[in-house]
Amino acid sequence: MTGHAYLASSGAYTWPQAVAYCQGLGYHLATIDDATENTLIWDILYDGADGVATNNAHTWIGYHDDGSGWAWVDGTTSGFQAFGAEVITDPWGTANFGQAAAFGNFEAAEWLEAPGNWIYAAICESEGA
């Protein structure tokens, strides 16, 4: 176990709004250190016991690129990435908000890259227990 608690939002936000939402709860957007934690969070979001996704939307995590490279929202570093092949670009959003990572594959624990001004759910993570 990670020693952290996770909270999936019921609302949808831009990436900056998702950051603020999690901070308002005393959490931060989820940071993912390894494949085990990645699968754990994906299971929370998409692997319902009945085989039906528990979250039917893309879900922001705390990984973003503001133009200076990919970084975690809490300043931690990790060499782990789980990007799939999907990259969404938007000339109106990319320049203003940068790209950010989100879960969105209901069949695999992969991330996609999307403009941070798109509206997705959020997965928040507590500080260590």
Image: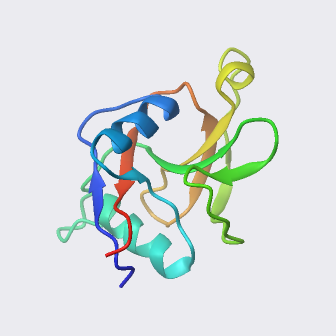
In the displayed structure image, the side of residue 47 where residue 102 appears, left or right: right
Quadrant in which the C terminus appears: bottom left
Residue at 51% x, 34% y is 15
In the displayed structure image, the side of residue 94 where residue 10 appears, left or right: left
Q: Position of residue 52 (x, y in %)?
A: 24, 59
Quadrant in which the N terminus appears: bottom left
Q: How many marks?
A: 0
For residue 120, say whether it is visible: no
Of 98 and 50, nearer the camera is 98
Q: Position of residue 30 (x, y in %)?
A: 45, 57
- Residue 52 sits above or below residue 128 on the image: above
Residue at 45% x, 39% y is 19
For residue 22, say whether it is visible: yes
- Residue 93 sits above or below residue 121 on the image: above
Q: Residue furthest top?
A: 92
- Residue 29 sits above or below residue 6 on the image: above
Q: Tell me which corner region of the image, top left, top right, bottom left or bottom right, holds residue 10.
A: top left
Q: Tell me which corner region of the image, top left, top right, bottom left or bottom right, holds residue 114.
A: top right
Of 59 and 84, nearer the camera is 59
- Residue 117 sits above or below residue 59 on the image: above
Of 23 and 31, nearer the camera is 23
Q: Position of residue 37 (x, y in %)?
A: 46, 75
